[in-house]
Image: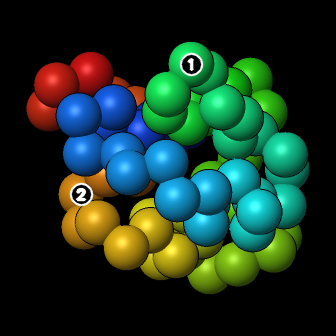
Amino acid sequence: MAYRIVPELCTSCGACELDCPNEAISMDRFTFVIDPDKCKECQGHFDTPHCASVCPVPGTCVPAEGPGA
């Protein structure tokens, strides 16, 4: 399952985009978005989805099939 970025919480700091090993994160207008076709939850690179680890705002990078999806 891919991850997504909650736009209301995203501060557009860019930390997630710089560290995404699959280049799945990009800017869309004023916030970042995750391409679900490219997101592999960092399998083979990190033990957990790295976007959620590096994001300074807890709860911004979440599983795509969760609350609010």
Label 2, residues with CA under 10 Å away: few <14, some 14-19, many ≥20: few
Label drawn at residue 67: none
**Is 63 situated above or below 67?**
below
Please identify the quadrant where the C terminus is shown: top left
Q: Residue at x 84, y 61 (%)?
A: 21
- The one of 34 and 39 positioned closer to us in this rendering: 34
The picture places residue 6, in percent across and down from the top left corner, at: 31, 36
Q: Residue at x 44, y 68 (%)?
A: 55
Q: Which quadrant would residue 25 be assigned to in this image?
A: top right
Specify whether 21 is left or right of 4: right
Q: CA distance from mark 1 to mark 2?
A: 21 Å
Dot 1 amino acid type:
Arg
Specify whether 4 is left or right of 59: right
Specify whether 69 is left or right of 20: left
**Is 19 situated above or below 12?**
below
Dot 2 amino acid type:
Gly
Q: Residue at x 70, y 78 (%)?
A: 46
The picture places residue 31, in percent across and down from the top left corner, at: 49, 33
| Residue holding disc 2 | 59
**Is 27 situated above or below 55?**
above
